[in-house]
Amino acid sequence: MLDAYIQAQDAPGLLDGCLRKACSYHASDIHIEPLVEGWQVRLRVDGLLHPLTRLPSALGLAMVVRIKLLGQMDIGETRLPQDGRMQITIAQQQLHIRCSSLPGHLGEKLVLRIQNRSRQVLTLADLGLHQEQLAMLKHHLAMPQGLIMITGPTGAGKTISLYAALHYLLEPERNIMTLEDPVEVVIDGVHQVAPKAGIGVGFNTLLRALLRQDPDVIMLGELRDHESAETAIRAAQTGHLIITSMHTNTALEAVQRCFGLGIDLAGLSYSLQLVINQRLLRRLCGNCARPMAPGWQRQMQSQAWQLARQALHDQGRVEQPRQATGCGLCQGGYHGRFGVFELWQVAAEQRHSIAKGQAPRVEDLASLQQQAMMAVLAGDTSVAEMARVLV
Ligand SMILES: [Zn+2]
């Protein structure tokens, strides 16, 4: 399909074709970048980039101009980074796209972030939490005040979990507000606010204003500095449920990061209720995944694997480890993603440690590892994917 547009040097048709491909693969971003010779187009699918096509130089440049025009960017300006946005209907689906340009040595690179606002918000039950974890999370979301943090590296699905939690809390008797940069998914019934650096309306100014709006639940995209963390913790002690995320590898690191922000530790120890650490694993394609070779299976005999095997059997699930192949219906043998989680409920003795600025004793990553192993044994994902995500 794309080849015909490339042959015809048809930039509008090619952009349309690339967006269609991006939609059919559920890609989150399209990268268009100059090479020494020509251009390349790549799609980010389930967190990883995949090459889509190569373009001759003139067509690549025409694509860039076309996108900058639609994105209401200055097509005459090629030396400064620019941001734009556009709305396009592809396959009866309205796409909201954020574009950014960054001039480099070989020319401008464009990245198109597809923000599909009609995207359905996942429910808590869809996230992949097992039953006990789901019950524990619901218990803490029902609390009238406190702090719930979601941790993980980039691409761990923290935002999806934050939105699912808000969706669960959506009741007429609650005033739910968010402060996020930017608003990624619109939830009807939630007042969502984003900082506007261009007119000097920053995160902390908005957070103070938001607290004067009689909120019950506040979702903060991220705790970033001393001021926002201090305000959030004060709010979490005065009748507000605060849900936020932090970019750390473990639950314990999130607490240590809070120590580093120089906030009131007694307040933190009192308000912190639950820390969720999570990762997203790519799901093996149902069409092409094939059973793992026996040689590989024999390597899955360590004590950790045996414990995961036992846990899988206890849940009455069948062991059928598989590996990725790749077919026309998937990207490299995978299609979609699912989450693995560990939940840390802060216990009384751990509160004492936090109040003193000492790292509490927390079992870290062990249960994430075990859940990933169970998913491998069940054939939901592969050993290679587990190794990629849980390093
Ligand atoms: Zn496949």
Image (cartoon, helix red, strand yellow):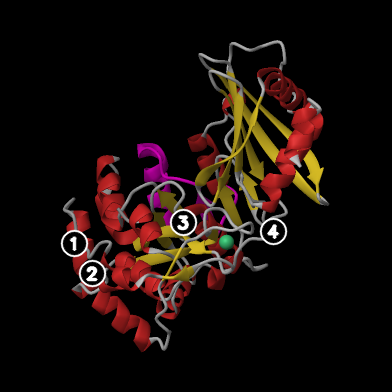
For this view, does 287 lie left or right of residue 61?
A: left
- Residue 311: image quadrant is bottom left
Q: Nearer the viewer, mark 1 or mark 4?
A: 4
Mark 1 and mark 2 in contact? Answer it, CB < 8 Å. Answer: yes
Q: Which residues are magenta?
A: 212-237
Say whether disc 1 or disc 4 marks the residue closer to the N-terminus.
4
C-alpha separation, residue under disc 2 versus residue under disc 4: 36 Å
Q: How many other residues sit within 10 Å of disc 2, few (<14), some (14-19) or many (≥20)?
A: few
Comparing 289 with 250, the one in front is 289
Comparing 30 with 191, the one in front is 30
Say whether disc 3 or disc 1 marks the residue closer to the N-terminus.
3
- Residue drawn 41% across and 64% down? 382
C-alpha separation, residue under disc 1 versus residue under disc 4: 38 Å
Q: How many other residues sit within 10 Å of disc 1, few (<14), some (14-19) or many (≥20)?
A: some
Amino acid beneath label 4:
Gly
Task: Identify the residue under disc 3.
Answer: 242
Specify whether residue 228 is painted magenta: yes
Image quarter for ligand 1 equals bottom right
C-alpha separation, residue under disc 3 versus residue under disc 4: 17 Å
Mark 3 and mark 1 in contact? Answer it, CB < 8 Å. Answer: no
Task: Identify the residue under disc 4.
Answer: 189
Return the x and y of residue 244 as percentages of the image width and height: 45, 53
